[in-house]
Amino acid sequence: MSKENSSLKKIFDSALQNHKTNNFQAAEKLYKKILKINPNHLDSIFLLGSLFLQIKNFDKAKQLLQKTIEINPNHENGYYNLGIVLKESGELQKAMSCYTRVIEINPNYANVTYNLGIVNTKLGNLHKAMNCYIKL
């Protein structure tokens, strides 16, 4: 492992530990430090986007989660979290598209089925919503 990769790993591990203990400010600084060194560090982009989702900064979360998906079009958690951002922002059809994509990638992702039920309920698609809840 190169010296730079070793250094990035240490910073990332520290960011992740801070994130897990809800020390969001420290985690955010560390993720951003990694992204200054490597702007396409997928895990940092995804986790920083997820952090922004947790603190309800939906604009920044949306931006980073979309970048996650651009880098890895099969990133099921990227689609899932983006779906949550879109649902919370009232973009229900787009949220449904994200959740549908997650199910295409992983048909057994139970939280997605639940959120699809919520979105379908909000859109008045009660039959589809019921099917989601039954599937759970």
Image (cartoon, rainbow, N blue to C red):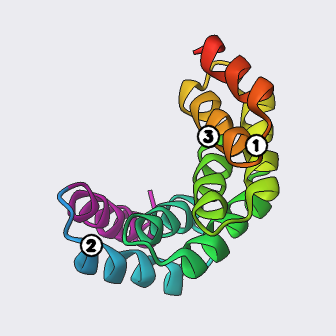
* Residue 20 pos. (x, y %): 24, 54
* Residue 114 pos. (x, y %): 58, 31
Amino acid beneath label 3: Ile
Of callouts 1 and 2, the N-terminal one: 2
**What is the number of the mark on residue 118?**
3
Q: Left or right: 108 with respect to 131? A: left
* Residue 116 pos. (x, y %): 68, 37
Q: Is residue 84 magenta?
A: no
Work out how far the residue at label 1 is from the one at label 2, CA to CA, in angstroms: 27 Å
Q: Quadrant of the C terminus?
A: top right
Q: Which residue is mark 2?
A: 24
- Residue interval drawn in magenta: 1-20
Q: Which residue is mark 1?
A: 74
**What is the number of the mark on residue 135?**
none
Other-residue count near label 2 (Cα within 10 Å), few / some / many at <14 / 14–19 / ≥20: some
Q: Secondary structure at mark 3?
A: helix
In terms of image quadrants, where is residue 71? bottom right
* Residue 73 pos. (x, y %): 80, 50
Mark nearest the camera among 3 and 1 is 3
Other-residue count near label 3 (Cα within 10 Å), few / some / many at <14 / 14–19 / ≥20: many
Q: Secondary structure at mark 2?
A: helix
Residue at screen point 30% across, 67% down: 15
Marks 1 & 2, CB-CB < 8 Å contact: no
- Provide the major secondary structure of the magenta segment: helix
Residue at screen point 56% across, 24% down: 110
Of callouts 3 and 1, the N-terminal one: 1
Q: Is residue 5 magenta?
A: yes
Of callouts 2 and 3, the N-terminal one: 2
**Vertical comparison of 83 with 18: above or below:** above
